[in-house]
């Protein structure tokens, strides 16, 4: 078991959790970026990249509008990719679509867990705001302003810990994966493109375009035609 | 109130901009971004109000409820500095800056949400996800470059607009025509997602099928269409995803 990998997963998971809402929001926390970087850190870029692509599409339409909290797409991406990478390391057979499918099916629900954690953290931030008000009333302005920065550390610690736990779980799940019968593994391998196709459809719906079915249909038609033309030219 | 307040140096203006990146560090349901805004402009207020009493008053007027889109907030942060400088010089009453924030935060939030969250982010995400088969991990790098080129440029530009124009920044923001550009970006996102769904279906058939290849590709495409319809009928995304995975598992195990 690689404790370094678990620690790396935790640190990256914590950093992107802070970046997601508390600081900058330059989209390092988007599934495509966060999961690919996680794959890079844990020496399994394909797992990170293909899980990131699927989750990017799946969560494409989610947005933090006003006070409404969406599913935590970042935790879902970092947790799933960390678990997939450590599962691949534990099996020693490298990353495969079957492994990505298992990781996605088991860990995609982390987005809902993240949402619950986000709600809890809002209560903590409310306490900080009250403290800041009291400090400002008492004339302690520097202390009042510092409260703003204290709002970030729980994001780092909690989400980092959850991501590290996912990486750890991956090490234990890896050997179990090897015991699955061949037909089940083939089925899981087929599940990845099926889920990716579904995620792309969900993304088309989540694009918020006025005539999304028309544009999605156009995109699909052009790509299908192009691939068929390439295949036909290869046959001739 | 101090009438002889020194002007804000470039260093202070840069510090305020950098601190505005922490606008949501302690986002809370009551005051929302109030603490973040006060934290961002604090170096400027310290400079404008050498008198402690005036400084306390200035900080308190920015600890009231504040919420807008975090990027577009840069325009309001700039505008707040514009007004605070005038207030410190005695050219306008303190309630002008409060009214300025209250008037702009709602419309700018709607503008920012519509353009950044519901247009630029999905479009960049869909384009770069569609490019994964070609660019591999570089698609993630491209995502960051494309998105932040627009994000950081607009954020800095809006800050400067607020700083120099004050209330007149509304006209300048309106000229940017963000809603129309957003609609185009959303169409790009939908087209890319559709294209990627087709590519995934066709390559899946080619890789897994053998003599079943056309059947599998068509099945995968049909799955995409059915998923779209189910999601449109408000079936939860997770349910649709697990259903598709279950179907594919069964097909893979028995075909």
Image: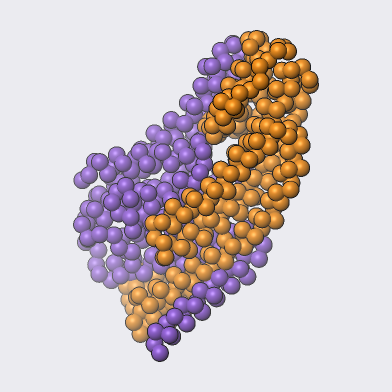
**Depth check: B12 or A196 in front?**
B12
**Depth check: B209 or A22 in front?**
A22
Residue drawn at point x = 57 percent, y = 15 percent: A141
Q: Which chain is purple?
A: A
Q: Is B208 above or below relative to A46?
A: below
Residue A133 in the image, given as x and y percentages of width and height: 59, 19
State how many labels appear: 0
For the rendered model, the colour scheme is by chain
Q: Is residue A163 left or right of residue A119?
A: left
Residue at the right extreme of this rendering: B92
Q: Is residue A39 left or right of residue B219?
A: left
Residue B215 visible within the image: no
User: Where's the N terminus of chain A, which quadrant?
Assistant: top left
Residue A19 in the image, given as x and y percentages of width and height: 47, 39
Using the rendered view, name the quadrant where residue A138 is placed: top right
Residue A90 in the image, given as x and y percentages of width and height: 22, 53
User: Where's the C terminus of chain A, which quadrant?
Assistant: bottom left
Q: Is A232 above or below relative to B199?
A: below
Using the rendered view, name the quadrant where residue B255 is placed: bottom left
Q: Which chain is orange?
A: B
Residue drawn at point x = 56 percent, y = 29 percent: B14
Residue drawn at point x = 36 percent, y = 69 percent: A190
Residue B217 visible within the image: yes
Residue drawn at point x = 43 percent, y = 45 percent: A75
Residue at the bottom extreme of this rendering: A236
**Depth check: A224 or B79 in front?**
B79
Residue B31 in the image, given as x and y percentages of width and height: 62, 29
């Amino acid at each position: 078991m690689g404790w370094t990998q678990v620690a790396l997963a935790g640190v990256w998971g914590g950093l992107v959790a802070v970046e997601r809402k508390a600081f900058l929001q330059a989209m390092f926390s988007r599934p495509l970026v966060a999961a690919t970087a996680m794959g890079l850190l844990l020496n399994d870029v394909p797992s990170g990249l293909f899980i990131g692509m699927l989750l990017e599409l799946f969560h494409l339409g989610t947005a933090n509008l006003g006070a409404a909290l969406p599913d935590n797409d970042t935790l879902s991406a970092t947790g799933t990719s960390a678990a997939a990478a450590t599962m691949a390391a534990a099996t020693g057979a490298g990353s495969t679509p079957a492994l990505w499918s298992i990781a996605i099916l088991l860990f995609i629900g982390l987005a809902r867990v993240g949402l619950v954690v986000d709600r809890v953290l809002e209560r903590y931030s409310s306490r900080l705001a009250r403290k800041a008000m009291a400090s400002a009333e008492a004339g302690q302005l520097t202390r009042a302003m510092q409260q703003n920065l204290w709002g970030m550390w729980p994001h780092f610690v909690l989400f980092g810990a959850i991501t590290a736990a996912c990486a750890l779980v991956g090490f234990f799940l890896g050997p179990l994966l090897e015991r699955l019968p061949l037909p089940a593994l083939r089925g899981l391998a087929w599940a990845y493109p099926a889920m990716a196709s579904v995620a792309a459809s969900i993304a088309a719906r989540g694009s918020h375009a006025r005539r999304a079915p028309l544009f999605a249909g156009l995109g699909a038609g052009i790509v299908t035609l192009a691939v068929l033309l390439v295949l036909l030219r290869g046959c001739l | 109130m101090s009438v002889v307040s020194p002007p804000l140096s470039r260093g202070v203006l840069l510090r305020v901009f950098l601190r505005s990146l922490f606008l949501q560090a302690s986002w809370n349901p009551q005051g929302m971004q109030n603490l973040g805004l006060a934290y961002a402009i604090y170096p400027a207020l310290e400079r404008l109000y050498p008198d402690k009493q005036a400084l306390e008053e200035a900080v308190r007027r920015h600890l009231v409820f504040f919420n807008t889109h975090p990027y577009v907030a840069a325009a309001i942060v700039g505008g707040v500095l514009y007004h605070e400088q005038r207030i410190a010089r005695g050219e306008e009453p303190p309630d002008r800056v409060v009214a300025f924030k209250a008037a702009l935060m709602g419309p700018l939030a709607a503008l920012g949400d519509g353009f950044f969250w519901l247009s630029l982010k999905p479009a960049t995400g869909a384009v770069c996800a569609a490019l994964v088969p070609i660019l591999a991990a570089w698609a993630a790098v491209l995502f960051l470059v494309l998105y932040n080129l627009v994000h950081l440029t607009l954020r800095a530009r809006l800050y400067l607009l607020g700083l120099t124009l004050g209330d007149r920044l509304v006209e300048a923001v309106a000229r940017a025509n963000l809603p129309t550009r957003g609609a185009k970006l959303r169409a790009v996102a939908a087209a890319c997602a559709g294209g990627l769904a087709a590519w995934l279906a066709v390559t899946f058939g080619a890789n897994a099928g053998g003599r079943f290849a056309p059947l599998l590709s068509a099945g995968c495409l049909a799955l995409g269409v059915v998923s779209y319809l189910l999601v449109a009928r408000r079936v939860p995304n997770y349910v649709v995803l697990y259903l598709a995975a279950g179907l594919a598992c069964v097909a893979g195990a028995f075909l």
